[in-house]
Image: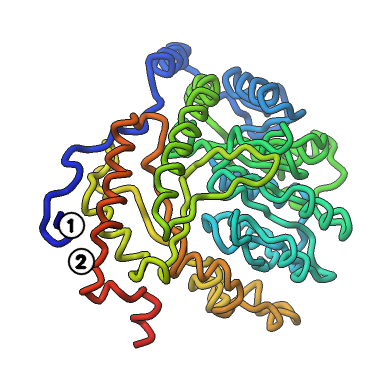
């Protein structure tokens, strides 16, 4: 059977269903807010309206109850939430924050907002979260925090990372953007460190377009997050705050419409997650039959929320590169409704390790003179060179690929087409061996 990438007939010729969680409940909730005429009720000064309107405050209460955490603070994005969290834990200029190289850039850039220095540790072979051993090797007298990422929906190594943080008296900021509903020992991801952050961005499990929520059980941290969210510098005097470090505030406020949508979405999370996990289990079982593919491992005592479904590919077994194998699979399939311009939702490598971005390679952040890197005597000891995190680099270049063709609106028939595409390419991979796709991208670059 001729592969589609070589001119054969594809396995599928219709779009995959959209991941669309917005329904009549959200529409009704938005209409009520519009009818009220109050789209936001924040005041950038200390008083009754400092913490926002009724929808925002109701979302915060419901989020706290759902996730079993004392404080939930709504913000306008997970990125904003990370910035609030870094400021709230008291990061000082020149201090170091250990971050992941294998995540969305905001997780690693957040320390720079406070002129602190991101230090990259490597990721785990099986779970792709920060490797505790690599983390501990990166700790110096200047280390103040770890920004841990529950990547792809997998909770981090709670016992080891938290023990390291306690040993060195540093904070754990948990980026749970991809992991709402994931658990470790029946505790929700996001609540496992000192402060956690969720995303309500449009392609997350649940969303309001753009938004986020910060959670913590620490009263002082919660209050500092609220201040940074809403013009702290204008509030601290009337509120009577003694500690004004990092109290330069922002407008990170969520609107009433976003909060109303988020409240409806939160009620759907468990149902959406159950279906996503069921679909992933099915695809794991089927694709595990391909010798060159390793299905994602789930950490002991953890529940995975599968923001995306990661797989590892063994080029030595396959005899062809991951990149060309995946391109052949994609040629057999179709894009997803509402995201037609993004192509088939399977991709290789996730993100380039973040320290290879120009920001870190040139050590240029604020202005043209390399601030804050150039201002620090020890900055030359901070390496962002290629080879810094070999596991992350190998995952990016050769082994990892991720799929979104397992979301909650995919039927068994849809997923069977995905399986057929993979099997067809595997069984006819000798067609690909005849081309330069026999080599991986990294191999070709060396030729």
- Position of residue 297 in the picture relative to residue 291 (left or right): right
> Residue visible at 66% across and 72% down?
372
The residue lying at 77 percent from left, 54 percent from top is 161
Query: Looking at the image, do the residues carrying marks 1 and 2 touch, with CB atoms under 8 Å apart?
Result: yes
**What percent of the width, then of the height, locates residue 378?**
75, 80
Q: Where does the image place residue 48, in percent across and percent down from the top left?
A: 70, 22
Instruction: Count all numbered tags in the image, as a single digit.
Output: 2
Residue 176, percent across and down?
61, 43
> Which of 44 and 80 lies nearest the eye of the viewer?
80
Q: Position of residue 38 (x, y in %)?
A: 50, 19
Dot 1 lies on which element?
loop
Give neighbour class at mark 1: few <14, some 14-19, many 20+ (Cα, 10 Å): many
Work out whether 5 lies above or below 194.
below
Q: Nearer the viewer, residue 204 or 17?
A: 17
Q: Is residue 191 above or below residue 117?
A: above
Quadrant for residue 165, please give it. Answer: bottom right
Q: Nearer the viewer, residue 33 or 193?
A: 193
- Residue 366, visible in the rendered structure: no
The residue wearing badge 1 is 3
The residue where tag 2 is placed is 431
On the question of residue 416 being in view, the answer is yes
Residue at 43 percent across and 56 percent down: it is 293
Seen from the viewer's position, the closer of residues 382 and 428 is 428
């Amino acid at each position: 059977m001729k592969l589609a990438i070589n001119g054969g007939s594809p396995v599928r010729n219709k779009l995959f269903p959209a991941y669309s969680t917005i329904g009549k409940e959200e529409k009704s909730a938005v209409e009520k807010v519009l009818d009220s005429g109050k789209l936001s009720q924040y005041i950038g000064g200390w008083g009754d309206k400092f913490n926002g309107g009724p929808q925002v405050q109701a979302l915060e209460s419901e989020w706290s109850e759902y996730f079993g955490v004392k404080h939930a603070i709504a913000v306008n994005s997970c990125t904003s939430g990370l910035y609030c969290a870094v400021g709230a834990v008291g990061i000082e200029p020149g201090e170091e924050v250990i971050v992941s190289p294998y995540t969305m850039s905001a997780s690693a850039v957040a320390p720079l907002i406070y002129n602190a220095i991101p230090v990259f540790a490597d990721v785990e072979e099986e779970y792709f979260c920060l490797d505790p051993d690599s983390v501990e090797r990166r700790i110096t007298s200047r280390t103040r925090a770890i920004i841990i990422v529950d990547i792809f929906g997998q909770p981090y190594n709670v016992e080891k990372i938290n023990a390291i943080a306690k040993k060195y008296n540093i904070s754990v900021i948990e980026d749970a953007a991809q992991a709402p509903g994931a658990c470790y020992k029946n505790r929700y991801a996001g609540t496992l460190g000192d402060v956690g952050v969720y995303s309500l961005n449009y392609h997350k499990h649940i969303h309001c377009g753009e938004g986020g929520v910060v959670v913590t059980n620490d009263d002082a941290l919660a209050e500092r997050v609220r201040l940074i969210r809403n013009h702290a510098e204008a509030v601290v005097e009337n509120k009577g705050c003694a500690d004004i470090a990092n109290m330069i505030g922002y407008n990170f406020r969520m609107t009433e419409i976003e909060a109303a949508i988020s409240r409806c979405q939160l009620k759907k999370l468990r149902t959406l997650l159950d279906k996503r996990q069921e679909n992933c289990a099915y695809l794991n079982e089927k694709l595990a039959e391909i010798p060159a593919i390793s299905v994602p491992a789930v950490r002991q005592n953890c529940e995975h929320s599968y923001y995306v479904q990661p797989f590892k590919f063994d080029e030595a077994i396959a005899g062809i590169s991951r990149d060309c194998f995946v391109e052949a699979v994609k040629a057999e399939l179709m894009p997803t409704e509402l995201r037609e311009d993004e192509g088939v939702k399977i991709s290789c490598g996730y993100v380039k390790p973040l320290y290879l971005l120009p920001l870190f390679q040139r050590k240029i952040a604020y202005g043209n003179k390399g601030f804050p890197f150039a201002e620090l005597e020890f900055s030359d000891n901070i390496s962002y060179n290629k080879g810094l995190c070999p596991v992350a680099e190998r995952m990016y270049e050769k082994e990892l690929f991720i799929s979104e063709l397992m979301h909650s609106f995919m039927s068994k028939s849809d997923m069977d087409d995905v399986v057929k595409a993979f099997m067809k390419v595997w069984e006819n991979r000798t067609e690909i061996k005849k081309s330069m796709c026999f080599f991986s991208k990294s191999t070709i670059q060396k030729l």
